[in-house]
Each structure stands twice: as C-alpha cells, then as structure tokens.
Image (spheres, rainbow, N blue to C red):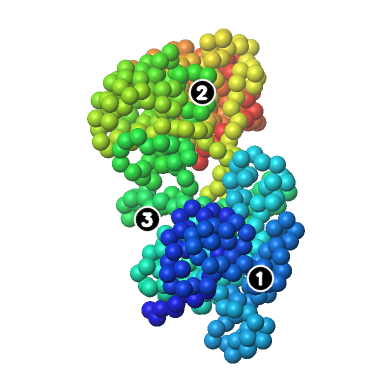
C-alpha cells in the first residue's frame, strides 16, 4: 500500500463541473499542472498556475484544435517507465517531464448522435487526443493515475484527501480498469454509428450503467440489469424491481404497444397475458381483463396505455399485484394505490427503443430483429367460402395481437375486445387449444361466436374440428402447411370462416 505522491498533472476536459475541489487539492500539494485551451483558462480562474501544453511541446494547437496533445513530450511523459534506466535516460535526453496524473474526458459523441446533429458535427465529436491520453495513462498505471470521466472526480477527490495527495498501485489499477471501460464504451458507440449503414457482421454492445438485483430468476442466482431504466420509467412507489419483474415488465409494455388507438389493459404472469381487454375507460378495461382469469391475476404485472384515474385505482386496489405500468396517474389514483407500500408503480415515459434482440446461447450470442410485424384486416386473406363479418374481423385482429405476445405453442380465444382464454407454451397446438377451452369454461365464458388465433399453421384439421365443437366461428392463422386445404375444407363444410396472414409469430 505504498503511496506515490502526485507531482505533476495533465488536465484537459470537456466537462468542468465539480473539478474545482481537485484543482484546489493539487494546488495545495504543489502539483505542477499542464493544460490546454478552455481547461487552462478554467484552472487559472481557480488561482492555480498552469503550464500551457503548447509551451511544453513548442507547438501550437493546430487544425482547428484537432491536434493539441499528440506530441512525444506529452505521451513520453505519460508512458515512460520510471524504473527503466533506458527510459529514464531518454526522458532526460529529450527533456521529457514525468506526468503522474492525467484528467481527461471525451467529446460527447453519444449525446451528439442522440441530438440528431448533422454527420459533420457527429464526426467532429470523435475524440482523438483524449482517447489516446486515456489509453496511454491506463497502460502505464504502475506510475500514472488516469481519471477518464467526470463521474470519477469525486472518487479522486476522496483519495487525494485521505492519502495526502498520493495514490497506491491498487488505486491506479482500479482507475485504469475504469478508463478502459470508458474507452471501449466510447468506441462501441462510434462503431455502431458507422455500422448503421455498413452492416459489418459484428455485435458490439456496451452498457455502462449497472444495477445489482436482489437475485435472478431464483434466489440462488445472482443478477444485474445493465441499462438506464430512468430513461423509460419514473418509479412512483414500491420496492426495487426484481429480475422476474423486469422480464414481465418488458413483456407487458411490448403487448400494450399493440393497441395505440384504443384504451387497453393487460395482466401478465410469467410474460403471458392472463387477461387483456379494450374498453371505453381504464376501469372497464381492467374489469374485463381481470375477468379472464381471476386466479392468475394474483401477483401479476398490470399495464395500461391510458392514464389511471381514481375510479380505476379503486377498482384494482383490492388485488395483490406486483407492478402497475401506465403513462400517467392522477393524484387521487396515486393516493389510493400507494396504500400498499411495496406495490411498484411505474410511469412509462417513452416507447421501447431499438429494433434488435440479443440473447446468450451455448458458447455465443444470437441476435435477431424484434418481431415488429402486426397484422391488420388488410393483411388477412380469406380462404374459406364464408368470410368473417366485420365484428369477427375486429375480433381476429385483437386475438392475433395477443397471440403474437404469448409463448408457443399457443392458441388464443377472444371476442373483439376481451381475451377469453389462451393455451400457452404447449408441446402441441391441440393441447394448447384444449387448455384454452377448459380455462374459458372455468371462468364462465361461452365460446359460441368466439374467434381463435394460432401463432403457427395447423398441420392437421384437428384444431378447427375441436374449435367448431366449442362454438368458435372464425379463425386466424399464418397458413403454410401442406395440409392447409384440409382445415379449409372442414371450415367450409361447417360454416366457419378462416383468414390467413402469411406471418408466423413463434415466441420461445
């Protein structure tokens, strides 16, 4: 734990917030400071003496500031090995001073891309000198301490106060690791910007914000969430989100996004909807969703796409549920819902971003496009002699939306505004249908005139046969089986209608 006193520092930063205490400490310990441009002016305003980098290198800042620190006297001062006799001799020969501390941050590339700036502005935010200084100082962590982000100013301040202006090898190695995290994250976003048009087959993912979760799917599994949930939600009440909560919340917001022009409500358990409905109000939509499975709703994740008012809040307050997601809550609704201190209330601020999905698998990672296809009436191809009536067409659209977000093999039974039941995650489509019919009966739904949606084609006519016996009159499915005609013929013989979409929605 031997301390190495900082005797010289190079400071060149974009963000100067909270840098003042560090400047004061360096001044207090008599540290020689080198700096550039706006940072130099800022340090001098703090009453500290500064040696301009231009004076060290005997070169001005050139090419509009693109080249300031890229010089052997700067990089030599950072990189030379203090215990190496040859390096010491060359440093003396070329009058290269040692630099013990480097404080540098990077131009805001991510922020500039997110702002919608022009490509010319974005390219100018690709940092060259800063990234090089970070890598050089981190490489020579045995002798140099690197602060690569404004987020680390506070940590450095604490170290300098506690250790009388010195650092340990453990400190320097820790900050070096942090620096390489900063540099790799930065380069990942630059690559991904360019790769939007180039399509190079490489996967680069970097999330620099991590949150430890209580545990994973089960208590013996450790887990973290990487990302910034605050961009997506304001948490208004309740305990911290768990791994399973997050998985269900993701499923919930994806499902509810299918109903942009209606007041919709869904209740999910283990990523599957046990209730889903549309109505004129959130209260009524909740009542209809809850009625689909009053047992499974216990401990579920609830989601709606409209503001929750007091009437809706009072209706759902007696139910034990883990999470409720909505775009807004009235003050009166919050007063009711906060009556349960552990109940998680999330205000959703934006739609889910991104068009890709990734998952670890075997000894690698698989990536795919998100399933963004949603079929409407215009996508339906009527394949039976009898076409669905308008109300049945609306019901088929509703059922297909829910089916898309349900684990395969799945069958969904509904009318035009309410999920009656679904069979989820079955090894055969027949089992899924039978499960759905039994469940609908248990919760009092008459399936006469109901519709059926399937996530994939029917290899045999058995499903439409069973559906007919239950009273179902219209079916939506992708089609594509070599025996499609068998199912069509049965429907024609029994007055049922069937539409095909040509789009399969497996969900594993």
Instruction: From the top left corner, tell me how far across and down residue 351 is, in percent.
Output: 52, 33
Q: Residues within 10 Å of mark 3 (few under 14, many from 20)?
A: few
The residue at 38%/41% (across/down) is: 245
Say left or right for 80 vs 287: right
**On the image, numbered disc 3 is attached to which residue?**
222
The residue at 60%/42% (across/down) is: 114
Residue 422 seen: no
Residue 370 image-quadrant placement: top right
Q: Nearer the viewer, mark 1 or mark 3?
A: 1
Q: Earlier in the sequence, mark 3 or mark 2?
A: 3
For numbered disc 2, what is the local secondary structure? loop
Residue 259 is labelled as 2
Q: Nearer the viewer, mark 1 or mark 2?
A: 1
> Which quadrant, please, contains the N terminus?
bottom left
User: Disc 1 versus disc 3: distance between alpha carbons?
Assistant: 53 Å
**On the image, numbered disc 1 is attached to which residue?**
55
User: Disc 3 versus disc 2: distance between alpha carbons?
Assistant: 35 Å
């Amino acid at each position: 734990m031997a301390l190495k006193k900082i005797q010289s520092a190079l400071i060149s930063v974009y963000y100067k917030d909270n840098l003042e205490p560090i400047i004061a400490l360096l001044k207090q310990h008599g540290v020689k400071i080198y700096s550039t441009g706006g940072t130099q002016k800022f340090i001098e305003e703090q009453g500290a003496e500064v040696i301009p980098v231009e004076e060290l290198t005997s070169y001005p800042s050139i090419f509009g500031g693109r080249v300031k620190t890229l010089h052997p006297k700067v990089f030599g001062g950072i990189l030379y090995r203090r215990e190496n006799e040859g390096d010491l001799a060359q440093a003396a020969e070329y009058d290269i001073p040692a630099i013990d501390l480097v404080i540098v941050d990077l131009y805001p590339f991510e922020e500039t891309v997110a702002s919608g700036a022009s490509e010319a502005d974005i390219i100018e935010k690709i940092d060259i000198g800063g990234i090089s200084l970070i890598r050089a100082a981190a490489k020579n962590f045995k002798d140099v301490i690197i602060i690569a982000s404004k987020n680390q100013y506070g940590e450095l301040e604490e170290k300098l106060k506690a250790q009388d202006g010195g650092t340990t090898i453990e400190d320097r190695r820790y900050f070096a690791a942090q620096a390489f995290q900063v540099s790799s994250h930065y380069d990942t976003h630059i690559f991904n910007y360019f790769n939007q048009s180039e399509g190079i087959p490489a996967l680069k993912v970097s999330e620099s914000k991590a949150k430890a979760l209580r545990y994973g799917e089960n208590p013996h599994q450790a887990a973290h969430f990487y990302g910034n949930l605050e961009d997506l939600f304001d948490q208004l009440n309740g305990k911290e989100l768990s791994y399973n909560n997050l998985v269900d919340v993701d499923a919930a917001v994806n499902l509810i996004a299918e109903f942009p022009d209606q007041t919709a409500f869904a209740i999910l358990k283990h990523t599957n909807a046990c209730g889903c409905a549309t109505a004129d109000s959130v209260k009524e939509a909740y009542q209809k969703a809850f009625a689909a499975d009053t047992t499974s709703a216990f401990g579920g994740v609830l989601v709606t796409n409209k503001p929750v008012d007091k009437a809706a809040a009072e209706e759902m307050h007696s139910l034990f549920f883990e999470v409720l997601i909505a775009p807004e809550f009235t003050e009166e609704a919050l007063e009711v819902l906060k009556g349960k201190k552990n109940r998680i209330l999330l205000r959703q601020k934006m739609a889910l971003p991104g068009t890709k999905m990734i998952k670890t698998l075997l000894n690698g990672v698989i990536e795919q496009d998100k399933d963004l296809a949603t079929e409407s009436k215009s996508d339906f191809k009527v394949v039976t002699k009898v076409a669905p009536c308008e109300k049945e067409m609306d019901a088929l659209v509703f059922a297909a939306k829910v089916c898309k977000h349900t684990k395969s093999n799945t069958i969904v039974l509904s009318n035009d505004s309410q999920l009656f039941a679904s069979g989820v995650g079955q090894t055969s489509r027949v089992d899924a249908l039978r499960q759905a019919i039994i469940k609908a009966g248990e919760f009092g739904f008459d399936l006469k005139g109901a519709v059926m949606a399937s996530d994939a084609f029917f290899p045999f006519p058995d499903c439409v046969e069973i559906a007919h016996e239950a009273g179902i009159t219209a079916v939506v499915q992708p089609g594509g089986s070599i025996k499609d005609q068998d199912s069509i013929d049965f429907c024609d013989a029994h007055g049922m209608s069937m539409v095909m979409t040509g789009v399969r929605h497996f969900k594993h």
